[in-house]
Image: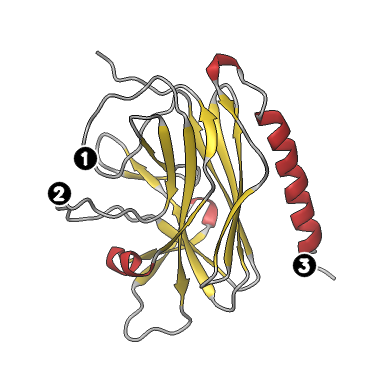
Amino acid sequence: MAGHIDRGLDRRRWLRGAAAAVLLSAVPGRGGAEAAMSDVASDTDFASGAKLDLRWSVSEAAVEIAYRLSNGGRGKVVVFDRMHWRDESGRQNPDPKYALVAIGRDGSVTVDKLAPQVPDEIDVMNPYMPYGRVVAPGAVLEGRAVLRLPLKQALPYSVGKGDLPAMTSRAVFRLGIAAFPDRWDGPPPYHKAELIGGEEAVLMRHAWAMMNQRVLVSPVTKLNVPIAQPKI
């Protein structure tokens, strides 16, 4: 039948590809980059029925996270994964492969595709808010995050400074989602947008996202890649 997708076959292909990525990325890369994998990492939000599967891979040039969000629930979900970065002029530049990156002093790395909270110690007029993609029940969404090496912090707000180690030690990936009702009490808290390539998206109000967002978190994975050091 035209347009029919064999979800079972689709998932088997995904798992075979993930297994291949595990075998390749478990081999130390040149330039001191190394990642250890065990299997496809996953997490499930039992309230919405959304499941996250992902795989990490490392090359000499970048760390890549390929993720897949399956909506196994009865309602729509919105996934806050269409991030943007700001150039020196302050202009927002949407980039589907961009992600927020926080690096701890112990070399731990948190990679985020979500709506970040505003730190308590600052006030902002326009909070950082990514675009969201709406996923229907039974549908699947896929995406990537590509982090160039040496790894740099990519934070939505300039808060706190500190020395960073030369290499990372471990990493987690987090993905923000929320239930997306078919009907709203009052005006919908979003407006529709069209992104690069004609991709349909929504921009939710930040306050609504902070009240309704749920975060899927991957298991911790070993990650040994170089960290960019500030110029002296």
**Residue beneath the point at 44% across and 85% down:** 183
* Image height of 62 relative to 136, above or below: above
Q: Quadrant of residue 202?
A: bottom left
Q: Name the N-terminal-most of marks 2 and 3.
A: 3
Q: Quadrant of residue 28?
A: top right
Name the mark nearer the viewer: 1 or 3: 1
- Residue 3: assigned label: 3
Frontmost residue, 135 versus 219:
219
| Residue farthest along the top direction in this orientation | 232
Q: In which quadrant of the rendered image does the C terminus lie?
A: top left
**Residue indicated by mark 2:** 121
**Circles 2, 1 touching at the beta carbon (< 8 Å):** yes
Q: Secondary structure at mark 1?
A: loop
Instruction: Tell me the kind of residue under disc 2.
Output: Glu
Place of residue 164 in the rendered image (x, y in percent of width and height, measured from the top left): 32, 25
**Circles 2, 3 touching at the beta carbon (< 8 Å):** no
Mark pair 2, 1: CA separation: 9 Å
